[in-house]
Protein backbone atom coordinates (compact mmCIF):
# COMPACT_ATOMS: atom_id res chain seq x y z
CA UNK A 1 0.00 0.00 0.00
CA UNK A 2 1.07 3.59 -0.58
CA UNK A 3 -0.35 7.09 -0.28
CA UNK A 4 -2.54 6.74 -3.37
CA UNK A 5 -4.00 3.44 -2.09
CA UNK A 6 -4.83 5.05 1.24
CA UNK A 7 -6.28 8.17 -0.37
CA UNK A 8 -8.46 6.15 -2.73
CA UNK A 9 -9.74 3.90 0.07
CA UNK A 10 -10.40 6.77 2.50
CA UNK A 11 -12.10 8.89 -0.18
CA UNK A 12 -14.52 6.02 -0.92
CA UNK A 13 -15.16 5.54 2.80
CA UNK A 14 -15.87 9.27 3.18
CA UNK A 15 -18.30 9.16 0.28
CA UNK A 16 -20.13 6.15 1.79
CA UNK A 17 -20.55 7.84 5.14
CA UNK A 18 -21.67 11.13 3.59
CA UNK A 19 -24.13 9.34 1.30
CA UNK A 20 -25.78 7.77 4.35
CA UNK A 21 -25.75 11.13 6.13
CA UNK A 22 -27.26 13.07 3.22
CA UNK A 23 -29.93 10.42 2.61
CA UNK A 24 -31.28 10.62 6.14
CA UNK A 25 -30.09 7.29 7.48
CA UNK A 26 -31.21 7.27 11.12
CA UNK A 27 -27.70 6.41 12.31
CA UNK A 28 -26.28 9.63 10.92
CA UNK A 29 -29.03 12.08 11.83
CA UNK A 30 -27.26 13.10 15.06
CA UNK A 31 -24.09 14.11 13.20
CA UNK A 32 -23.36 17.52 11.74
CA UNK A 33 -20.44 17.24 9.35
CA UNK A 34 -18.76 20.53 8.39
CA UNK A 35 -19.85 21.98 5.04
CA UNK A 36 -16.25 21.74 3.84
CA UNK A 37 -16.18 17.98 4.53
CA UNK A 38 -19.47 17.49 2.67
CA UNK A 39 -18.36 19.54 -0.34
CA UNK A 40 -14.94 17.88 -0.57
CA UNK A 41 -16.33 14.41 0.26
CA UNK A 42 -13.40 14.02 2.66
CA UNK A 43 -13.71 13.22 6.38
CA UNK A 44 -10.00 12.95 7.04
CA UNK A 45 -7.71 15.50 8.63
CA UNK A 46 -4.83 17.39 7.02
CA UNK A 47 -1.90 15.03 6.42
CA UNK A 48 1.01 14.69 8.83
CA UNK A 49 4.38 15.89 7.61
CA UNK A 50 7.43 13.64 7.67
CA UNK A 51 8.79 15.93 10.39
CA UNK A 52 5.69 15.33 12.57
CA UNK A 53 5.91 11.58 12.05
CA UNK A 54 9.62 11.36 12.84
CA UNK A 55 9.12 13.57 15.92
CA UNK A 56 6.46 11.12 17.12
CA UNK A 57 8.76 8.19 16.42
CA UNK A 58 11.53 9.92 18.36
CA UNK A 59 9.24 10.55 21.32
CA UNK A 60 7.99 6.94 21.30
CA UNK A 61 11.48 5.58 20.56
CA UNK A 62 10.25 3.34 17.77
CA UNK A 63 9.70 3.33 14.01
CA UNK A 64 5.98 3.21 13.19
CA UNK A 65 4.77 0.37 10.96
CA UNK A 66 4.65 1.03 7.24
CA UNK A 67 0.89 1.09 6.55
CA UNK A 68 0.19 3.25 9.57
CA UNK A 69 2.98 5.68 8.59
CA UNK A 70 1.48 5.92 5.09
CA UNK A 71 -1.99 6.49 6.59
CA UNK A 72 -0.67 9.46 8.60
CA UNK A 73 0.86 10.94 5.43
CA UNK A 74 -2.63 11.00 3.91
CA UNK A 75 -4.69 11.92 6.98
CA UNK A 76 -3.27 12.76 10.37
CA UNK A 77 -6.05 10.91 12.21
CA UNK A 78 -9.72 10.42 11.42
CA UNK A 79 -12.75 12.19 12.85
CA UNK A 80 -14.90 10.04 15.07
CA UNK A 81 -18.68 10.14 14.83
CA UNK A 82 -21.35 8.18 16.70
CA UNK A 83 -20.34 4.53 16.95
CA UNK A 84 -16.99 5.02 15.20
CA UNK A 85 -13.62 5.33 16.91
CA UNK A 86 -11.64 8.54 16.44
CA UNK A 87 -8.14 7.76 15.19
CA UNK A 88 -5.59 9.97 16.88
CA UNK A 89 -3.20 12.47 15.37
CA UNK A 90 0.52 11.61 15.40
CA UNK A 91 1.21 14.03 18.25
CA UNK A 92 -1.44 12.29 20.40
CA UNK A 93 -0.08 8.76 20.07
CA UNK A 94 1.15 6.96 23.16
CA UNK A 95 1.64 3.51 24.61
CA UNK A 96 -1.55 1.82 25.79
CA UNK A 97 -0.39 1.51 29.40
CA UNK A 98 -0.13 5.29 29.78
CA UNK A 99 -3.94 5.73 29.84
CA UNK A 100 -5.15 2.19 30.46
CA UNK A 101 -2.84 0.32 32.80
CA UNK A 102 -5.99 -0.70 34.70
CA UNK A 103 -7.33 -2.52 31.59
CA UNK A 104 -4.01 -4.33 31.26
CA UNK A 105 -4.00 -5.33 34.93
CA UNK A 106 -7.59 -6.60 34.85
CA UNK A 107 -7.06 -8.61 31.65
CA UNK A 108 -3.73 -10.01 32.88
CA UNK A 109 -5.29 -11.11 36.16
CA UNK A 110 -8.31 -12.70 34.49
CA UNK A 111 -6.21 -14.73 32.01
CA UNK A 112 -3.10 -15.50 34.06
CA UNK A 113 -3.99 -19.16 34.72
CA UNK A 114 -4.63 -20.07 31.08
CA UNK A 115 -2.04 -22.20 29.24
CA UNK A 116 0.33 -20.41 26.82
CA UNK A 117 -0.82 -19.94 23.22
CA UNK A 118 1.35 -21.67 20.61
CA UNK A 119 2.62 -19.72 17.60
CA UNK A 120 0.63 -22.05 15.36
CA UNK A 121 -2.56 -21.14 17.19
CA UNK A 122 -1.70 -17.46 17.63
CA UNK A 123 -0.74 -16.67 14.03
CA UNK A 124 -4.17 -17.45 12.60
CA UNK A 125 -5.99 -14.43 11.19
CA UNK A 126 -9.51 -14.15 9.87
CA UNK A 127 -12.03 -11.47 9.11
CA UNK A 128 -13.94 -10.49 12.24
CA UNK A 129 -12.61 -13.55 14.06
CA UNK A 130 -12.36 -13.10 17.81
CA UNK A 131 -9.01 -14.57 18.73
CA UNK A 132 -6.93 -15.48 21.72
CA UNK A 133 -4.76 -12.82 23.22
CA UNK A 134 -1.26 -12.94 24.63
CA UNK A 135 -1.72 -10.60 27.58
CA UNK A 136 2.02 -10.08 27.90
CA UNK A 137 1.85 -8.06 24.65
CA UNK A 138 -0.61 -5.52 26.08
CA UNK A 139 2.10 -3.66 27.99
CA UNK A 140 3.94 -2.79 24.76
CA UNK A 141 1.02 -1.97 22.43
CA UNK A 142 0.58 1.47 20.90
CA UNK A 143 -2.81 3.16 21.29
CA UNK A 144 -3.84 4.88 18.05
CA UNK A 145 -7.51 5.61 18.76
CA UNK A 146 -9.61 7.04 21.52
CA UNK A 147 -11.53 4.49 23.57
CA UNK A 148 -15.23 4.14 22.70
CA UNK A 149 -17.59 1.93 24.69
CA UNK A 150 -14.60 0.05 26.09
CA UNK A 151 -13.00 -0.58 22.68
CA UNK A 152 -9.74 0.77 21.31
CA UNK A 153 -7.38 0.17 18.36
CA UNK A 154 -3.86 -0.93 19.25
CA UNK A 155 -0.76 -1.74 17.23
CA UNK A 156 1.38 -4.60 18.53
CA UNK A 157 5.13 -4.32 17.82
CA UNK A 158 5.76 -7.83 19.20
CA UNK A 159 4.36 -9.46 16.02
CA UNK A 160 5.71 -8.01 12.79
CA UNK A 161 5.25 -8.88 9.11
CA UNK A 162 7.12 -7.03 6.34
CA UNK A 163 7.57 -3.74 8.24
CA UNK A 164 4.05 -4.06 9.67
CA UNK A 165 2.82 -4.50 13.22
CA UNK A 166 -0.15 -6.60 14.15
CA UNK A 167 -3.31 -4.45 14.57
CA UNK A 168 -5.87 -5.17 17.30
CA UNK A 169 -9.44 -4.15 17.93
CA UNK A 170 -9.27 -4.61 21.69
CA UNK A 171 -12.23 -4.53 24.05
CA UNK A 172 -12.25 -4.44 27.82
CA UNK A 173 -15.47 -6.50 27.94
CA UNK A 174 -14.72 -9.55 25.77
CA UNK A 175 -12.05 -12.19 26.44
CA UNK A 176 -10.49 -12.19 22.98
CA UNK A 177 -9.32 -9.60 20.50
CA UNK A 178 -9.83 -9.08 16.77
CA UNK A 179 -6.35 -9.25 15.28
CA UNK A 180 -5.07 -8.37 11.81
CA UNK A 181 -1.63 -8.64 10.25
CA UNK A 182 -1.50 -4.89 9.66
CA UNK A 183 -3.37 -1.63 10.14
CA UNK A 184 -4.09 -1.59 6.39
CA UNK A 185 -5.66 -5.06 6.57
CA UNK A 186 -7.78 -4.05 9.55
CA UNK A 187 -9.26 -0.96 7.94
CA UNK A 188 -9.75 -2.35 4.45
CA UNK A 189 -11.48 -5.47 5.79
CA UNK A 190 -13.76 -3.56 8.19
CA UNK A 191 -14.16 -0.14 6.55
CA UNK A 192 -13.94 3.08 8.53
CA UNK A 193 -17.51 2.75 9.78
CA UNK A 194 -16.71 -0.79 10.94
CA UNK A 195 -14.38 0.35 13.73
CA UNK A 196 -15.70 -0.77 16.11
Image (cartoon, rainbow, N blue to C red):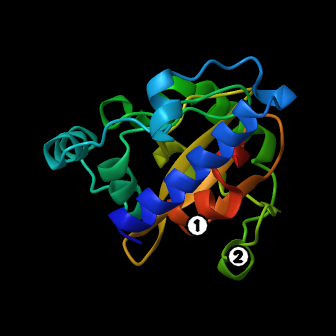
**Residue at image coords 41%, 72%:** 1
Furthest residue toward left: 51
Q: CA distance from mark 2 to mark 1?
A: 23 Å
Percent position (x, y) of residue 161? 46, 76
The disc, 2 or 1, on the residue closer to the chain's N-terminal end is 2
User: Label 2: few (<14), some or many (≥20) within 10 Å?
Assistant: few
**Residue at image coords 73%, 69%:** 117
Query: 154 above or below 130?
Result: above
Percent position (x, y) of residue 111? 78, 47
Query: 194 above or below 114?
Result: above
Which residue bears the numbered disc 2? 118
Disc 2 on helix, strand or loop?
loop
**Residue at image coords 57%, 45%:** 14
Q: Is residue 136 visible?
A: no
Which residue bears the numbered disc 1? 185
* In the displayed structure image, the side of residue 31 where residue 142 appears, left or right: left
Q: Which mark is residue 75?
A: none
Amino acid sequence: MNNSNWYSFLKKESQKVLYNYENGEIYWTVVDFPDEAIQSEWLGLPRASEKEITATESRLRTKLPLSYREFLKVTNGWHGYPGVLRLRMAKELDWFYVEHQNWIDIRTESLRNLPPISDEQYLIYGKNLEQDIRVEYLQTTLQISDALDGEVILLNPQITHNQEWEAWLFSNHIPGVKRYQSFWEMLTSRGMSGIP
